[in-house]
Image: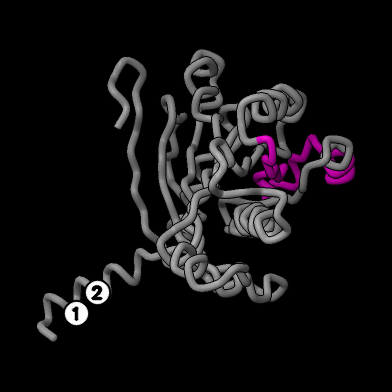
């Protein structure tokens, strides 16, 4: 086999995945959404982060059990003036990362509005995790863990605290949502072939479907391996044509 052929095959194998899932990252401006996502993608803190303008897109492929999952990650602006635009990107989302700042009571007070928009526009099977960011600033805390945990339970969403500065728990929200979606697929409650599900089959999964009547997800309870990072960043600015 020629080197160029080998290189092409290796690239195809690297990019192969079983499922593609659409996630949205939502919440008030200044809660650290972009920094959280940046640390998840790059495993490093994003210095001098500015407010997101419109929507930014990135992706990462992760391993869960025997499955490779490509996550489409839509980071939305938290400022009110972009709300009508960013809400259009909620459509068909399978997962939502709902972020507030543990040092900001105001960012916590508006969570219900963000969640209501997501539930109204995203997939009917939307999986949401509430993320209390900036856990490294516990001495400035305005929202107690117990209060946020109760809000999450009352609204039937998952909950955890993270620090986009230290990286503590940064991967957990994304992997938790992806795992919950996989389990919903295996149980039959979510059909990736249904429009608006926020999930689609990748080439690897389609090959398995063709050779077997049942998808096997292997063990999802073990600690997942860190996935291959593939980054694609695009900034969308109102008034311009989206890609």
Question: Which element carries disc 1, helix, strand or loop?
Answer: helix
180 over 147 or under it: above or below: below
Counting from the top left corner in percent of width and height, residue 224 is at 61, 71
Query: Pointer 1 and pointer 2: residues touching (CB < 8 Å)?
Result: yes
Counting from the top left corner in percent of width and height, residue 14 is at 35, 69
Q: Is residue 40 left or right of residue 217?
A: left
Residue drawn 65% across the image and 29% down it: 118
What's the magenta region?
124-150
Is 143 one of the magenta-colored residues?
yes
Q: Which mark is residue 9?
A: 2
Question: Quick one: which residue is furthest to the bottom in this view?
Answer: 1
Q: Is residue 64 left or right of residue 85?
A: right
Is 133 one of the magenta-colored residues?
yes
Nearer to the camera, 84 or 33: 84
Question: Which element carries disc 2, helix, strand or loop?
Answer: helix
Q: Is residue 132 visible?
A: no
Q: Is residue 57 visible?
A: yes
Q: Which mark is residue 83?
A: none
Nearer to the camera, 104 or 68: 68
Q: CA distance from mark 1 to mark 2?
A: 5 Å
Counting from the top left corner in percent of width and height, residue 138 is at 75, 47
Nearer to the camera, 204 or 104: 204
10 Å neighbourhood of mark 1: few (<14), some, or many (≥20)?
A: few
Q: Quadrant of residue 27?
A: top right
Residue drawn 46% across the image and 62% down it: 206
Residue drawn 55% across the image and 26% down it: 78
Q: Which residue position holds label 1? A: 6
Which image quadrant: the N terminus? bottom left
């Amino acid at each position: 086999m020629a080197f160029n052929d080998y290189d092409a095959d290796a690239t195809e194998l690297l990019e192969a995945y079983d499922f593609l899932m659409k996630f949205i990252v939502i919440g008030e401006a200044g809660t650290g959404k972009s920094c959280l996502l940046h640390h998840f993608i790059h495993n490093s803190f994003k210095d001098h982060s500015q407010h997101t303008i419109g929507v930014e897109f990135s992706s990462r492929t992760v391993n869960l059990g025997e499955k490779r999952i490509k996550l489409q990650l839509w980071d939305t602006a938290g400022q009110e003036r972009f709300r009508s635009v960013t809400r259009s990107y909620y459509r068909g989302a399978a997962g939502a990362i709902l972020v507030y700042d543990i040092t900001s009571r105001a960012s916590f007070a508006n969570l219900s509005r963000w969640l209501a928009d997501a539930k109204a526009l995203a997939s009917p099977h939307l999986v949401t995790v509430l993320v209390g960011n900036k856990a490294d600033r516990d001495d400035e805390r305005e929202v107690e863990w117990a209060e946020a945990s109760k809000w999450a339970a009352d609204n039937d969403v998952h909950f955890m605290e993270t620090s986009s500065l230290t990286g503590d728990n940064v991967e957990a929200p994304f992997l938790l949502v992806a795992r919950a979606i996989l389990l919903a697929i295996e149980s039959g409650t979510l059909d990736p072939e249904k429009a608006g599900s926020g999930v689609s089959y990748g080439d690897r999964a389609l090959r398995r479907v063709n050779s077997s009547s049942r998808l096997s997800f292997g063990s999802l309870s073990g600690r997942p391996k860190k996935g291959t990072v593939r980054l694609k960043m695009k900034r969308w600015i109102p008034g311009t044509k989206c890609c």
